[in-house]
Image: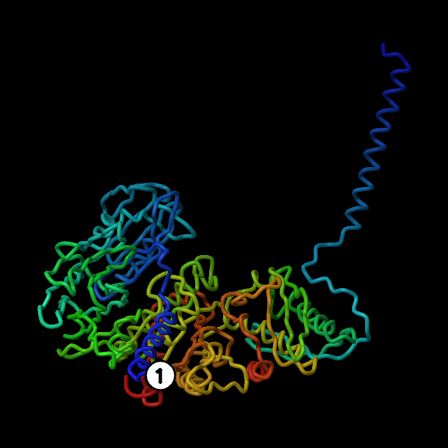
Amino acid sequence: MRPWACLHTAARVFALVLTVAIVPLHSADEKHIVIYGPGTTFSLPVLDRDGREYVGLLECLEPLGTVNARIEGTHWKLRYNDGESDFTASKNRARVRGHDMDFPGNFLLENNRGLVPLVSLGTLLPRILNTPVSFNPVSRRLFAGNVATHFTAQLSKTTPPRLVMNFTAPVNPTIATEPGRLRMSFTREPLVAPGTPTLTFDDKSIPSATYVENNGVAEVTVNGNAPLMASFSNDGRTITVSPVPQQPATPAPATAAALNSPAAPIPGNAPKTVPASATHYYAVIDPSHGGDDRGAALSDSLAEKDITLALARRLRQEFESRGIPTLVLRDSDLNVPLDERAAQTNTAHPTIYVSLHAASDGKGVRLYTALLPSGVENNGPFVAWDTAQTRSLPISKATAQNVAAEFQRRQLPVRTLQAPLRPLNNLTTAAIAVEVAPASGDIADLTQPAYQQNVASCIATAIAAMHNQLGGPP
Amino acid sequence: MIPRHLQIAIGILLLSVLGMGFYVGRIRGRAQQAEPAADSRPVAPPAPGPSESVTLYVANDAGGILRAQASSIPLPSARQQRAEELLRALLDIYLGKDSPHPLAVGSEVRAVYLVDPGLVVIDLNAAFANGHRSGVLEEELTVTSMIQTLAANIPDILRVKFLVEGKERDTLAGHADLSTMYDTIAVSQLVAQMQ
């Protein structure tokens, strides 16, 4: 076999392995709504109740502002920022900011959780948020405020031809190729449709592109008569699609174009082919549990999954205020399997992974590192899934000790232990888990913003302080 | 006027009804006495063999620690039955009054299998796992106390695997990993931190 053929085959195998390894966050079959707000994008599960689609209202509002809800008999009283709303269980009428409004279905109360018909969000949220909202119930995408990202597509008749797509904000779609088309899936970007869903170009190589959106995802498919590749430029605001060069000795572009993974924007104006793992997050935060997996029942109405999500948002804020790029593995009430959490983290190649848990027993904070079998060594390029943490365990333990020291400095009870807690053992990076118990033994501590902030601040301070040890400045 | 023979017949019938009622009442009382009181603890089969001194590693929620506790229990000679008796003795403590680490009512070890070389498989019942309190430390205490109790009293145990109702399960109650094989050396080192 000629050398270029070997390289080409190796590139294809590499692309296939990566495509299989990179697992999507949730099944495509699950119904979701994606909400785009100023500075945040999150997805929520859509529930079927009596043949109608419902969504948790509190979950819709939590990432967008300060919100709380309380139950008084059959009434569910919601406060968002400075506005009060009053919903009644099994009634299709509510009072929102002093005005009555009707729903197309009844308001439901389930386990203290208020559910509203999905289709009502388009009229309900503008009143609660006091801001314009655009909602497409068919594709289940909701835009709160002026957050939309628009794009234009223009074919440049060079040799070879190039389709230049300009976006009004940086984008980072998942790119997949198949014979005759290149598909870009925008899961986090508030991308909106161009003037017409099908764009046609007077060119044989790239005759058309189509825009569709479904189940919270916007998708742009570029159709071509030859294998296509995408490259990013202009800080992620421009994507250029062009036929893959025919020279067989350069397998890298084909590999990158075929990757079914998020491709990161590359700074600079010159178009560059997207590398497989250009996105670099310094920290990954994993709020444990979510969705059907409520975690520990901390009280009759308080689930572990809600505390971990609140803590994760505070910790992300603390990291980002220190200039640390941070990825949160779930930013809504989603159930992400443990293997997927591990795969997402390993794919992102962060410097530190922090898993968050909450408990009602004990006082203060417990820090965990992985419990691994003794005498295991991962030699060679491959590591065993169950013991992937082996090489990083010393730095994980050092991180836990530093975080513990910061808690002690702030006089919060802290303890460090190893634990058989997945996915710690599946991670190839420094990894710790933080289990937060009430500071004083009173379960109400866990919901106190001051306590959550103190915990988040301790973790972020300690981790930021050891950036040299962890592998360079964030 | 009711004829005399009818009066006698009615009297006999009334006496019979009263007698039957009294008899049925006695029988029901005896049946209730014979029924054992509801007991959530696992039923320990008779364990032939002399009592032996063993060390149980008992979880204590108050401090989040494991305590080595000397105990004397009858143990059979076969290793597998010894393992089952050790875990039953441990669960007796957890299910008893004033338990330092309460488990759910009906929690039980269905069986312990010794698979050479050095592998022990502990099969828990559904009540054990489904009713276990959720939390990293609570679950870790349960798992490590069972493993360390076996490792400390039965030589040559190297690895321990948990099943629930004979099937694999990801976690005990959302945290402690049950999908893995536990290495008893690593657990012993962890137990040293937890004492």
Residue A216 screen position, x and y as percent: 28, 57
For the residue carrying disc 1, how many other residues have a C-alpha within 10 Å: few (<14), some (14-19), or many (20+)?
some
**Amino acid on which disc 1 is placed:** Ala
Q: Is residue A269 above or below residue A98?
A: below
Which residue corresponds to the image point at 35% horizontal and 77% vertical from the top-left?
A14
Q: Is residue A415 above or below residue A289?
A: below
Which residue corresponds to the image point at 86% horizontal and 28% vertical from the top-left?
B16
Residue at the spot of label 1: A462
The answer to which image quadrant residue A192 occupies is bottom left
Which residue corresponds to the image point at 13% horizontal and 68% vertical from the top-left?
A164
Quick check: B184 left or right of A151? right
Residue A319 screen position, x and y as percent: 29, 77
Q: Chain of mark 1?
A: A
Residue B29 screen position, x and y as percent: 79, 44
Which residue extends farthest front?
Answer: A1
Residue A414 screen position, x and y as percent: 45, 79
Give the position of the N terminus of chain A as an image quadrant.
Answer: bottom left
Can residue B138 be seen here? The reply is no
Q: Is residue A333 above or below residue A438?
A: above
Which residue corresponds to the image point at 21% horizontal and 67% vertical from the top-left?
A226
**Residue A375 versus residue A70: which sits nearer the camera?**
A375
**Residue A83 versus residue A243: which sits nearer the camera?**
A243
Which residue extends farthest left?
Answer: A157
